Amino acid sequence: MNIPRKVPYLSYEQIGEISYDFLSEHGLEKQIPINIESILEFDLGMGIIPIPGFQQNHSVEGSLSIDTKTIYVDEYVFRAVETRYRFTLAHELGHLLLHKEFFEGTGVSTILDWKRAYRAISENSYFELEMQAYNFAGHILVPSPHLRSRFTDFVSDNKSKFVEARRKGVVREITLSFFKNNSIYRLSKLFNVSPEVMEKRIDKDNLMALIP
């Protein structure tokens, strides 16, 4: 096996552009929440197969098949935790779009080869692969244009409350914390992602700076 030693660098912003370009190419940039399951099954022709005990046996919630035509996902996550299921699918799509070339020509053809391949790369490279796929999942499920638009609407809707809080002498940090938590709750429902994913997207896009 000829495994590349270094993962090509992609910034958080570059990954966001790749994810949004992908949505645009498939005519899906206007829909919220993003139907990641439909994208995989109908736009890309991939299969999604729930497997009992997958996470317990492999220490991951999902993975691509060797031929990259199927995503295996833990059955419990598939059945009971929708936001984690959606994020797992988006994460594996990230690997497919961002890292396919990384493993092309390596001679990987069996599950054992995949395990050897991951052992062959450095811990830093493995972390980079996973982080890029994680960031891709956050971007494609919560596209920046939609997130910024919805967040700006929330800010506009609450302007009078910010003014009232200042008038009453409420510490600004408390006001911002309350608003952020409320926004995370509402937006995570709107985009159908976990609060943790939504908080990271808000922080990474520096949206709290929009508050007057």
Image (cartoon, rainbow, N blue to C red):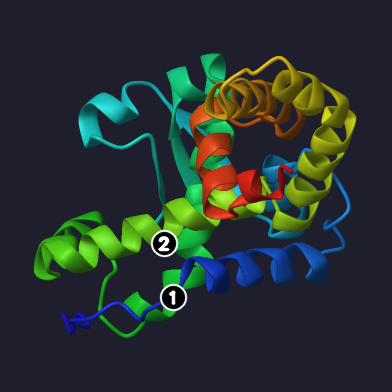
Whether residue 145 is visible, yes or no, is: yes
Q: Quadrant location of residue 172?
A: top right
Between 56 and 123, the residue placed more toward the observer is 123
Residues 49 and 152: in front is 152
Figure quadrant of the N terminus = bottom left
Residue 103, which numbered label? none
Looking at the rendered structure, the secondary structure element under dot 1 is loop
Q: Is residue 176 left or right of residue 70?
A: right
Which residue position is annotated with label 1? 10
Q: Are marks 2 and 1 in contact (CB under 8 Å)?
A: yes
Question: Residue 137 placed where, x, y %?
Answer: 54, 50
**In the image: residue 176, left or right of residue 163:** left
Which quarter of the rendering shows the C terminus?
top right
42 over 109 or under it: above or below: above
Q: Secondary structure at mark 2?
A: helix
Which residue is painted at 15% across and 70% down in the image?
A: 121
The residue tagged 2 is: 132
10 Å neighbourhood of mark 1: few (<14), some, or many (≥20)?
A: few
207 vs 105, nearest the viewer? 207
Q: Judge from the rendering whether residue 145 lies leftward or rightward of residue 117; answer left or right.
A: right
Q: Earlier in the sequence, mark 2 or mark 1?
A: 1
Above/below status of 162 relative to 39 = above
